[in-house]
Image (tube, rainbow, N blue to C red):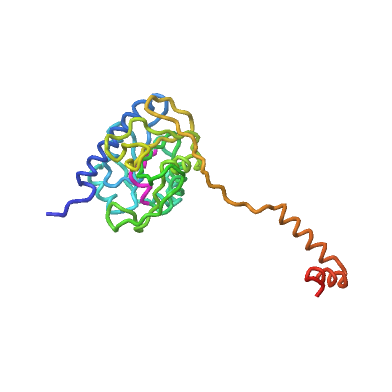
């Protein structure tokens, strides 16, 4: 008997079923105003969400960074196109654009989540749905986290976990004009206790056009309190002007200026 597969564990069954339910509710409203026919599932694992999208009538492509996951997914969902691709590789963009881009449970396992989000933006013609673990805090920051070597963890055992605010800010700066929080988050403990350390996951939607939905709450781009110190160019220009004038003086005047600067010595 073969060993149990990690993505078949009860915890993943619960994550997948509750995430699919939340996504399905949102899509039921949004398909009425958006032309959503094609979809790509980025970080598909064994293809549970890919199969769910196919059941909703989408023409589905799915990718994962681990070839072994792709091979298993092909066995389980032969009607879905599965390919091996890294979300952090800009070559992903060559797959073209899709009406719906979905990325669940992947972003926080990456070393370069902002690059991955830029790739997701390039793939999106209408709508992105993204679900992620989030780092504690309200500032748009990330935490660099060690991850164990396991089938369901990062490829390189190190990952950047964004706060929800950071995730929202990255989506805006990647080029999405509208970012929304799903009001009806998945029915799972990890999505509850908003505003406290208890919440560890979030689900967002991002689009190029405004969306009308009773299930979405538009998020403003977060502003960071920290301001980087920028050198005062006026001070630098004044110093350079003084040095220029000193360099233009005849040598005796230069010597005199240096003597006065050194106190007459």
The answer to which quarter of the image holds residue 16 is top left
Residue drawn at 32 percent across, 37 percent down: 193
76 with respect to 81 (left or right): left
Residue 238 seen anywhere in this rendered image of the structure: yes
Residue drawn at 47 percent across, 43 percent down: 170
x%, y% of residue 143?
Answer: 41, 51
Residue 61 seen anywhere in this rendered image of the structure: no
Q: In the rendered structure, does residue 206 fall within the stretch colored magenta? A: no
**86 versus 55 height, above or below:** below
5 with respect to 136 (left or right): left
**251 versus 234 height, above or below:** below
Q: Residue furthest bottom?
A: 265
x%, y% of residue 238?
Answer: 76, 56
| Residue in front for this viewpoint, 233 or 207 | 233
Q: How many marks?
A: 0
Is the N terminus in the top left, top right, bottom left or bottom right quadrant?
A: bottom left
72 with respect to 111 (left or right): left
x%, y% of residue 195?
Answer: 38, 38
The answer to which quarter of the image holds residue 48 is top left
| Residue in front for this viewpoint, 150 or 34 | 150
**What is the span of residues highlighted in magenta in the rendered image?**
101-109
Residue drawn at 48 percent across, 34 percent down: 220
Is the C terminus in the top left, top right, bottom left or bottom right quadrant?
A: bottom right
**128 versus 115 height, above or below:** above
x%, y% of residue 124?
Answer: 44, 38
């Amino acid at each position: 008997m073969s060993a149990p597969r990690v993505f078949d564990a009860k915890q993943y069954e619960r994550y997948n079923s509750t995430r699919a339910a939340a996504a399905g509710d949102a899509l039921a409203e949004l398909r009425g105003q958006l032309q959503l026919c094609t979809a790509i599932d980025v970080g598909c694992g064994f293809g549970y969400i890919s199969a769910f999208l196919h059941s909703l009538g989408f023409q589905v492509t799915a990718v994962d960074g681990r070839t072994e996951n792709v091979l298993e997914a092909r066995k389980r969902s032969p009607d879905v196109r599965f390919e091996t691709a890294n979300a952090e590789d800009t070559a992903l963009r060559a797959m073209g654009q899709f009406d719906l881009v979905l990325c669940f449970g992947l972003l926080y396992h990456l070393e370069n989540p902002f690059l991955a989000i830029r790739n997701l933006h390039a793939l999106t013609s209408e709508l992105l749905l993204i679900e992620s673990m989030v780092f504690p805090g309200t500032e748009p920051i990330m935490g660099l986290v060690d991850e164990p070597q396991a089938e369901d963890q990062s490829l390189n055992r190190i990952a950047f976990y964004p706060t929800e605010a950071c995730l929202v800010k990255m989506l805006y700066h990647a080029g999405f004009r509208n970012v929304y929080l799903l009001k009806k988050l998945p029915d799972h403990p990890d999505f509850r206790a908003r505003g406290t350390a208890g919440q560890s996951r979030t689900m967002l939607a991002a689009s190029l056009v405004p969306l009308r939905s009773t299930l979405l709450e538009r998020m403003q781009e977060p502003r960071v309190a920290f301001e980087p110190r920028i050198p005062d160019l006026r001070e630098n220009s004044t110093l350079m002007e003084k040095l220029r004038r000193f360099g233009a003086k005849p040598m005796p005047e230069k010597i005199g200026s240096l003597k006065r600067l050194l106190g007459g010595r």
